[in-house]
């Protein structure tokens, strides 16, 4: 797998660094937004800069009348090259909240992207914001392409000044998970087949402790009617169910979390072909849910929670071919439920239904979470800043919402409207999969109600990341394309159990 190069993150509390400035190319200092105007943060870094470079920060700030100290604003000042330090960045941090320090980190990361600089970052001062800030520094620098001739750009190194070693290490774990997910998402679908995803899971697991991978294909998928119906449209190599497990010795009595991810490596819509054509251009990212759950499990040996975690990657290509499923087909899901197919472009819920049924019947999870770029309807009410979250467990929903705000992977609790369930009735099967009866709209809700049919009494959460899983622009922490949404939230939540 082609891997994007992540910047280097360090933490240092060595006062000698502020005396010698050895090895540094740039320094960043935060500027607060106050009622009196923008004011530079008072810290050891800012005091040392003032003394060493004989610079009056307030005077420098006053020369930029449009600079307010709003989070993400940056003033770049040239300073004494004799020390090897080329630039001083004054970075707006707003009210110094976690979210504003995340924005400041993303702005500084973008400003230094590809520079090869070693930057002393004196922007963040509180431990509870370091993970967000450091993560934003790294995520904003993500670059992935397959150009034959690429101008080599060196990775930036950030030294976050303060006693933050554990926070920076945690940020590095989260960044690695998100970079892995983004790398998988951005890989073109002519390379990224279900079999290729299986090989990548095996390769990554080989470098991790307590991770095992089992891949099911061919006859092993005989009970997986949804996965076979969708993946049969592209029989070479055909669908795969990839089971990635974190189960250290002695973990049999730990809580068991099962994560199910939609892994559609490309989605043409099948016979119900996607229209207009430009909608299809982003469909290589329709496996973002599978990438998220796999990356989450791969982070467990570093997090070391007292939790068993299993990811089920339900991988298939939804192609248009002579072996594609048809509207009016009836399939049998893993748990024996029959489903009438009315729209072959609603394929994600079919592969997830198999995964959820398998998890419930075979793995006996304490928590069951599915993650999927499932419905465009999820973006209609929530836009692209929040993922739609469905669960009957209000306490768990509240916790995930709070952790989402902390981690940056934000989720919003949506209703499971029981009145809409009649839309799933079918004249010829147990269910239809698009809630065609009743014309209730609420496509994200009815999709969640369909999935709920397969979870029984398990403690279930559905995350529809159709909006948050992809970005249309290159800005902030995100690049245009796959965002890698999900691992931060899931890792934080599992670590809290």
Image (cartoon, grey):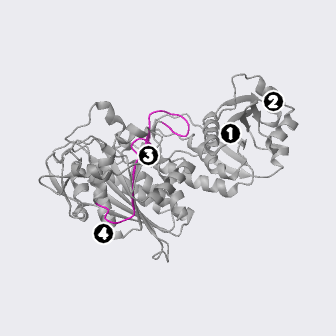
Query: Is residue 404 magenta-colored?
Result: no
- 107 vs 22: above or below: above
> Label 1 belongs to which residue?
95
Instruction: Give the secondary structure at mark 3.
Output: strand
The answer to whether residue 344 shows anywhere in this view is: yes
Residue 219 pos. (x, y %): 22, 64
Q: Is residue 469 magenta?
A: yes
Of 150 and 8, the residue lying toward us? 8
Q: Earlier in the sequence, mark 4 or mark 2?
A: 2
Which residue lies at the image location 67% right of the left edge and 58% below the top edge? 166
| Above-or-below relation of 240 to 34 | below
Image point 28% across, 53% down: which residue? Answer: 450
Q: Residues within 10 Å of mark 4 (few under 14, many from 20)?
A: some
Q: Quadrant of residue 314?
A: bottom left
Inter-mark Cα distance, 3 to 4: 27 Å
Please name the residue that numbered disc 4 is placed on.
361
Residue 93 coordinates in the image, percent (x, y): 68, 38
Q: Earlier in the sequence, mark 2 or mark 1?
A: 2
Q: In this figure, which residue is indicated by the disc labeled 2?
A: 58
- Are dots 3 and 1 in contact, CB under 8 Å? no
The number of callouts visible is 4
């Amino acid at each position: 797998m082609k891997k994007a190069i992540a910047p280097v993150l360090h933490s240092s509390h060595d006062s000698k660094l502020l005396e010698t400035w050895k090895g540094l190319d740039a320094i960043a200092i935060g500027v607060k937004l106050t009622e009196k105007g923008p004011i530079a943060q008072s810290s050891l870094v800012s005091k040392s800069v003032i003394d060493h470079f004989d610079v009056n920060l307030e005077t420098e700030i006053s020369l930029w009348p449009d600079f307010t100290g709003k989070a993400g604003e940056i003033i770049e000042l040239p300073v004494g090259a004799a020390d090897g330090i080329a630039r001083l960045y004054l970075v707006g941090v707003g009210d110094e909240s976690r979210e504003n320090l995340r924005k400041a980190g993303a702005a500084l990361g973008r400003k230094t992207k590809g520079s090869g600089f070693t930057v002393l970052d004196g922007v963040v001062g509180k431990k509870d914001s370091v993970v967000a800030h450091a993560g934003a520094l790294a995520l904003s620098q993500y670059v992935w392409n397959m150009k034959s001739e690429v101008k080599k750009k060196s990775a930036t190194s950030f030294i976050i000044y303060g006693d933050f070693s554990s926070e920076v290490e945690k940020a590095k774990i989260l960044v690695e998970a998100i970079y892995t997910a983004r790398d998988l998402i951005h890989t073109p679908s002519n390379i990224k087949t279900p079999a290729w995803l299986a090989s990548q899971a095996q390769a990554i697991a080989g470098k991790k402790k307590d991770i095992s991978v089992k891949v099911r294909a061919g006859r092993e998928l005989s009970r997986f009617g949804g996965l076979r119906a969708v993946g049969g449209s592209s029989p070479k190599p055909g669908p795969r169910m990839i089971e990635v497990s974190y189960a250290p010795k002695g973990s049999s009595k730990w809580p068991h979390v099962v994560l199910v991810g939609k892994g559609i490596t490309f989605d043409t819509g099948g016979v119900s072909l996607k229209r207009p054509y430009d909608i299809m251009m982003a469909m290589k990212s329709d496996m973002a849910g599978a990438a998220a759950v796999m990356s989450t499990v791969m982070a467990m040996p570093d997090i070391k929670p007292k939790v068993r975690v299993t990811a089920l990657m339900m991988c298939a290509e939804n192609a248009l071919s002579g072996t594609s499923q048809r509207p009016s087909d009836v399939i049998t899901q893993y748990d024996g439920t029959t489903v009438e197919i009315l729209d072959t472009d609603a394929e994600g819920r079919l592969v997830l239904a198999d995964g959820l049924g398998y998890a419930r019947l075979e793995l006996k999870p304490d928590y069951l979470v599915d993650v999927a770029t499932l419905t465009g309807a999820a973006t209609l009410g929530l836009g692209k800043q929040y993922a739609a979250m469905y669960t009957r467990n209000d306490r768990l929903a509240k916790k995930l919402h709070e952790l989402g705000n902390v981690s940056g992977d934000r989720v919003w609790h949506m209703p499971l409207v029981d009145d809409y369930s009649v839309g799933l009735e079918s004249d010829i099967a147990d269910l239809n999969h698009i809630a065609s009866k009743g014309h209730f709209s609420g496509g994200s809700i009815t999709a969640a109600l369909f999935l709920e049919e397969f979870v029984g009494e398990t403690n279930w959460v559905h995350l529809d990341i159709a909006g948050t899983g992809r970005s249309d622009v290159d800005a902030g922490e995100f690049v245009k394309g796959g965002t890698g949404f999900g691992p931060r939230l899931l890792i934080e939540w599992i670590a809290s159990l």
